[in-house]
Image (cartoon, rainbow, N blue to C red):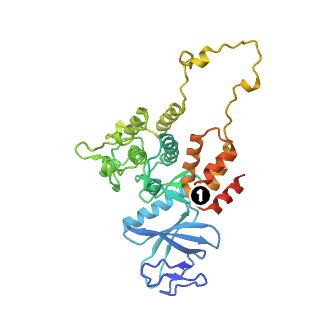
Amino acid sequence: MTLCINPNCPNPHNIDAHLFCQGCGSELLLEGRYRVTKQRGKGGFGSTYEVRLRQAETKILKVLTDNLPKHVELFQREAFLLSQLHHPGIPAVEDGAYFTYYAKNRSEPLHCIIMEHVVGLDLQDYLRQRGQPIEQRLALQWLIQVVEILQVLHQKHVLHRDIKPSNIMLKAEGSLALVDFGTARSVTNISGDPSGQAGTRVVSSFYTPSEQMYGQAVAQSDFFALGRTFVYLVTATELGKLYDSTTDTLKWHQAATDLTPEFTDFLDYLMMPAVNQRPTTTAEILQQLQQLQTSSSSIPTVPLADAPAAFAEEKVDEDAAIPPSRQIQTPRKLDEQFVERCQKELAEFIGPIAAIVCQQALATDPTASERDFIEVLSRHINKHQDADNFKRTVK
């Protein structure tokens, strides 16, 4: 099935054999190579579709249906910025990704961008399906990924300006991608001084800091939105329910009682009301995240004086050989490549949540055998036949 992207088409559905729409006469093979197969979304000033490139890979088509000069400028800016940014966490675009398309009997063109198809769920949809907050360990992992993406942007003097859960994608294999660069902006300097940085106002309720509402977005504006995003993820609560209008802050600590005080303070640091109260650079944030990750993963040791009496009373002859049955065996951890392969294969059956399932399985039994690990993962696959196929694939 091929879809016509003419907004005024009375019947946009066509069979693949057609080169022109049977409903309005518009050309179906865009740029001589793209066929539109499915509409993914519609709203604001445009629509998004899945397109197929000559029976091969699937890509995403963004179409601007509003030709106001400012909207066209933002749309073209997005295409240019994406062409300059190269990172696994940023949707890739190729040369010629931006083009204009004239539908039948339409005087104004449709502005189009072809970009990488990021397979997965945005974090807002992910959390809704998960039904519970993410744990601190996962939050730290995800924060590091997003900040590393932001580091690429900021080093190119680009501000995203619309970071929120719906603009971060969890890919099927477990990594994150930052999407929707329609409001991103290049600036001459993102040193943290908001003076002279006036620009188009971009506002997402509860995620946008005050300076950005006045057209003064800076690097720290992205940090504020990032902090708000992770408050949502670690509380699984819409920010509007946590917002205190009398203080213009979020009252969120009681909704996330499983976090360490250090991590709670860190998220508050990202969301400080004044620009100069927040972190200065992505490098500073990454350094603090690494420290938090190290402290979170450290395992407290039991002092010898506090050891159980059974061990304290037992006397061992240091010169005697210890029988193999009494020797302490170091728990063997699963091979990282094996776990990664299991996660990738599991994602084929249950989607992006496979990353969480694998992490939870490892946390529950870090010393599980490969066979037991596979068995635990297979229980998350609804269909018995699919579960069997998964087991055969990863053995």
Above or below, 346 relative to 267? below
Q: Residue at x 67, y 33 (%)?
A: 331
Q: Position of residue 72 (x, y in %)?
A: 41, 67
Q: Residue at x 56, y 62 (%)?
A: 117
Which of the 4 quarters of the picture holds residue 255?
top left
Q: Position of residue 259 (x, y in %)?
A: 43, 37
Q: Position of residue 166 (x, y in %)?
A: 43, 56
Between residue 158 and residue 275, name the one nearer to us: 275
Disc 1, SS: loop
Between residue 62 and residue 95, name the one nearer to us: 62
Q: Is residue 67 left or right of residue 80?
A: left
Q: Quadrant of the N terminus?
A: bottom right
The residue pinned by badge 1 equals 381
Between residue 363 and residue 97, name the one nearer to us: 363
Res. 85 visible in picture: no
Res. 261 visible in picture: yes
Disc 1 marks which amino acid? Answer: Ile
Q: Position of residue 237 (x, y in %)?
A: 37, 50
Above or below, 334 relative to 1? above
Q: Is residue 204 left or right of residue 15?
A: left
